[in-house]
Image (cartoon, rainbow, N blue to C red):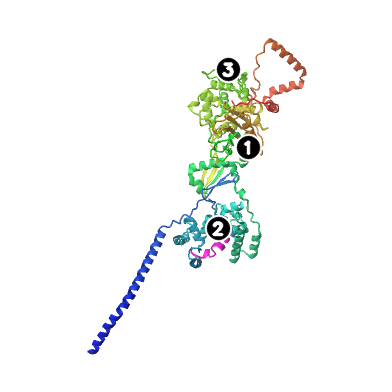
């Protein structure tokens, strides 16, 4: 019994002596477990929160620049907002460029699932040694995740998000799809995003045409775009290129001999100044295109969606227009830093409505005078008056009296402030006489003239224009060069109206056609009447106010100048091309100091047309059978009244003396003029152009 008692005593004693130690251990374990639970819970919560905020990877679609092409399919310019990116499919990326990136950025790309454990361990070790996040073990997939969805912050949260996104991306896309997205996403310096934009910026070519040397150079740039850019530091870029080539040799993509050859190869870098595309000559046209596309599809479409916009612009004609505008005088510089007077020129193919050239001013302003400036057209409106008269049965030989007249207190005047009496319609238009034009408009009726002008494309006319001053170009709102050129296009196209257009086709980044232009034709004037008016306007070029615009081939046109000398025009056409030229002060505050439609605008028009049509064979205007006899009328004005008796004797003496000197050959020449007055008008151009003509500007 004592033994049992002793045993109980020992047990009790033992229990009492071990109790503090056990308690401490239990407490310690409880604290550790609690800390682990807290850490694990916090970590899980952090990871859960991070995962819940991850973006959707099902649509990795970076912003892409849109491309604007000319009528021949040549690139004019790229249009982008913040990032100049031109996505290309992987099949258009050369194998050497793909291998260069894999060898340099992620040699185990085809063997991991988004995260490379070996690379991660290496990055962790380096970061521990450097007491911070100084190196990453990012795979190509992680870099894609970071560039497409995340910031460049060096934080644990960003790194975790990057890893989780990489895993998701690998689950959603194939390796080739990931590589394609990566190569279209990364930055190469000089504002270039993606391999296509970089290829064009540095080498002036498409990515598919890159050599091994060029591929290695590009693959080395993304590690530090500003430092390794060959434009900024060619030596450093070459050193980085050598590293890339070494990696390609290491992983068996190329041989050492190929690497050595690539190191010594000419890179074919373009000069920085060559990056400024010739589209700078077409800035007003480009802005016109951007405005049209933005209005229809929104700003994001043009700046971010990578559209391919095929336009009507012919860069040869555009360059000719820019060169011709150099004839503008310099009077003063306005408060906006723009030279005055300003000018505009727009040219249209009359058969399909294509705008082949457009210059909206001189300077870098956004105001396009070719499309937005509504200015008074002056005598450039007179062809509508004469066309309406021809439709009413008049002919070039019809007579109008150039004499004073009063319309309820308004007494129209000729530019020369004189009157020449009875004259043919042809001569009145040829010399741009104001009073005859007003009388003809009064006879025909302004309502008919306004309706005709509207049918031909003038949209700015209002009921307020239903007055005789409109016959001389005194409009309520004016007219833009584009609209006036479009209206004259009806004449060049034998009476058929085709609305002008600047866009042929728009294709989205997936190759789907969003829109494609189709020609909509409508006859608005009979072919006979157009042929007769065109023939009369040919006389303007050969013997009238437009001789400065004559270019030695069939051309028709009309001068125009406002009576306050603030606007001067020349609008004319051949069977293949129509062009309108305008000159004036932006604010209308200054006169043109003697410039009229028959001077500087005519010279600009002639220079432009001669160069724009240099490779186009000359052709005659179409004259239908029912107009053949009519076009021969009006070359001779009515015989003036006989002078007083004494003056008559003097004139008779002079005529006799003159007759004695004339040869039979001369008499025959006069006969030939009577038989073919049109040919006489053309052949006499050389003599008449030597004489100083009175400009119309009327």
Secondary structure found at label 1: helix
Does residue 9 sit above or below 42 in this rendering?
below
Q: Residue 427's spot in the image, x, y percent? A: 63, 23
- The structure residue drawn at horizontal position 39% and vertical position 60%, both measured from the top left corner, is 49
Q: Which residue is mark 2?
A: 222
Dot 3: element: loop
Compared across the picture, whether 463 is left or right of 215 comes to: left
Q: Of label 1 and label 3, which has the lower sequence position? A: 1
Q: Are marks 1 and 3 in contact (CB under 8 Å)?
A: no
In the orientation shown, which residue stands out farthest toward the top? 645
The residue sitting at the bottom extreme is 2
Callout 3: 10 Å neighbours few (<14), some, many (20+)? some
Residue of label 3: 404
113 magenta-colored: yes
Marks 1 and 2, Cα distance to the nearest angstrom?
A: 44 Å
Which image quarter holds the C terminus?
A: top right
Whether residue 391 appears in magenta in the rendering, the answer is no
From the top left corner, tell me how far across and down residue 373 is, in percent.
53, 34
Q: CA distance from mark 1 to mark 3?
A: 41 Å
Closest to the observer: 129 or 495?
A: 129
């Amino acid at each position: 019994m004592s033994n049992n008692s002793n045993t109980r005593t020992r047990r009790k004693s033992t229990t009492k002596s071990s109790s503090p130690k056990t308690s401490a251990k239990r407490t310690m374990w409880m604290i550790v477990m609690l800390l682990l639970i807290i850490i694990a819970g916090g970590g899980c919560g952090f990871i859960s929160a991070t995962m819940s905020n991850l973006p959707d990877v099902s649509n990795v679609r970076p912003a892409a620049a849109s491309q604007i092409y000319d009528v021949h399919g040549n690139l004019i310019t790229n249009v982008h907002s913040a990032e100049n990116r031109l996505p290309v499919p992987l099949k258009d990326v050369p194998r050497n460029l793909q291998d260069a990136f894999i060898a340099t950025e992620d040699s185990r790309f085809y063997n991991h699932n988004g995260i490379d454990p070996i690379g991660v361990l290496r990055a962790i070790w380096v970061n521990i040694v450097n007491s911070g996040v100084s190196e990453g073990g990012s795979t190509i997939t992680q870099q894609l995740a970071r560039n497409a969805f995340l910031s460049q912050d060096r934080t644990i949260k960003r790194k975790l998000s990057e890893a989780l996104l990489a895993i998701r991306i690998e689950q959603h896309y194939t390796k080739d799809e990931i590589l394609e997205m990566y190569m279209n996403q990364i930055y190469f310096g000089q504002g270039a995003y993606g391999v296509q934009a970089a290829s064009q910026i540095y080498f002036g070519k498409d990515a598919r045409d890159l050599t091994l040397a060029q591929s290695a150079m590009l693959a080395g740039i993304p590690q530090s775009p500003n430092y390794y850019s060959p434009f900024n530091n060619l030596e450093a870029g070459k050193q980085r290129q050598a590293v890339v080539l070494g990696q390609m040799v290491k992983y068996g993509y190329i041989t050492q001999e190929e690497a050595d050859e690539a190191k010594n190869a000419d890179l074919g870098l373009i000069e920085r100044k060559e990056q400024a595309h010739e589209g700078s000559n077409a800035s007003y046209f480009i802005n016109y295109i951007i405005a049209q596309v933005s209005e229809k599809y929104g700003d994001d479409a043009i700046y971010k969606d990578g559209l391919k916009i095929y336009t009507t612009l012919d860069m040869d004609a555009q360059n000719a227009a820019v060169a011709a505008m150099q004839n503008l005088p310099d009077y003063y510089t306005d408060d906006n830093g723009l030279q005055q007077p300003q000018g505009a020129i727009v040219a249209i193919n009359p058969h399909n409505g294509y705008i082949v050239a457009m210059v909206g001013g001189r300077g870098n302003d956004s105001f396009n005078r070719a499309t937005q400036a509504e200015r008074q057209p002056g005598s450039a409106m007179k062809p509508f008056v004469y066309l309406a008269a021809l439709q009413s049965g008049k002919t070039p030989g019809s007579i109008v009296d150039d004499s004073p007249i009063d319309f309820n207190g308004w007494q129209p005047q000729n530019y020369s402030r004189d009157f020449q009496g009875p004259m043919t319609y042809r001569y009145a238009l040829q010399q741009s006489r104001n009073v005859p034009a007003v009388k003809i408009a009064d006879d025909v009726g302004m309502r008919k003239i306004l309706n005709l002008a509207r049918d031909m494309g003038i949209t700015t006319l209002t009921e307020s224009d239903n007055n005789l001053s409109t016959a001389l170009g005194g409009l309520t709102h004016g007219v833009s060069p584009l609209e006036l050129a479009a209206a004259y296009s009806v004449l060049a196209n034998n009476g058929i109206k085709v609305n002008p257009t600047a866009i042929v086709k728009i294709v989205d980044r997936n190759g789907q056609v969003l829109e494609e232009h189709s020609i909509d034709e409508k006859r608005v004037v009979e072919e006979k009447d157009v042929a007769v008016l065109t023939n009369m306007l040919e006389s303007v070029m050969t013997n009238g106010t437009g001789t400065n615009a004559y270019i030695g081939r069939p051309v028709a046109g009309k001068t125009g100048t406002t009576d306050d000398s603030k606007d001067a025009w020349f609008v004319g056409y051949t069977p293949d091309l129509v062009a309108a030229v305008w000159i004036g002060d932006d604010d209308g505050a200054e006169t043109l100091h003697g410039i009229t439609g028959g001077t500087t605008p005519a010279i600009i028009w002639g220079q432009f047309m001669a160069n724009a049509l240099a490779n186009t064979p000359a052709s005659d205007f179409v004259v239908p059978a029912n107009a053949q006899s009519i076009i021969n009328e009006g070359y001779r004005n009515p015989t003036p009244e006989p002078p007083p008796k004494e003056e008559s004797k003097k004139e008779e003496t002079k005529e006799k003396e003159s007759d004695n000197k004339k040869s039979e050959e001369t008499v025959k020449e006069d006969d030939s003029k009577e038989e073919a007055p049109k040919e006489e008008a053309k052949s006499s151009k050389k003599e008449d152009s030597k004489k100083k003509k009175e400009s119309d500007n009327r």
